[in-house]
Amino acid sequence: MIKPKYQRILVALDGSKNSIRGLNNAIYLARQCQATITGIYVIPRPPHPAFRSPRYPEKPRLRGAQNLMDFAKRHSAQNGIIFEQKIVFGDTSSTIVKFAKNKRFDLIVIGARGISAVKEVFFGSVSNYVLHKSSIPVLVVK
């Protein structure tokens, strides 16, 4: 049997239990294939500046994202895996798909449900979008 060779794994993080499980699965796969992991955290932002507050409401979310990325980096390092981080603003679903395609990742790991307010029956709306729109293999962790 031929083992798939993953060199670059993208894991979507949002702080939910499923995203942490996704990180653990990505670490396991990375150890098997000697791959590197990149964690992406997408902070949603209204599409038009008129809908944004004049203050900087994303600052607490940015701090939370950085804390999560620091945890993921430590956790990966404890398992001997190189972890890179990417925190971006935008639409979560499409940003993950575009980033994975543009940076040529071999695999996307994503939790089945995140911390979003909208919950679907089996998959979260973000994981469902990524699963159907990505041309890259996707591992959905529940």
Image: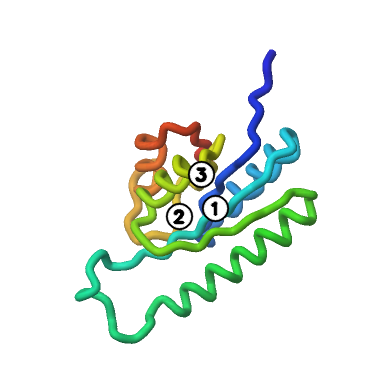
Q: Mark 1 highlights which residue?
A: 19
Q: Mark 2 highlights which residue?
A: 114
Report the amino acid beneath label 3: Lys
Tell me whether circle 1 and circle 2 mark residues in contact (CB < 8 Å).
yes
Q: Earlier in the sequence, mark 3 or mark 1?
A: 1
Label 3 to label 1: alpha-carbon separation: 21 Å
Q: Quadrant of residue 26?
A: top right
Q: Earlier in the sequence, mark 2 or mark 3?
A: 3
Q: Residue at x 64, y 25 (%)?
A: 4
User: Of the residues tagged 2 and 3, which is closer to the observer?
Assistant: 3
Which mark is drawn over residue 103? 3
Q: Earlier in the sequence, mark 1 or mark 2?
A: 1
Q: Is residue 89 visible?
A: yes
Q: Give neighbour class at mark 3: few <14, some 14-19, many 20+ (Cα, 10 Å).
A: few
111 or 70: nearer the viewer: 70
Label 2's element?
Answer: loop
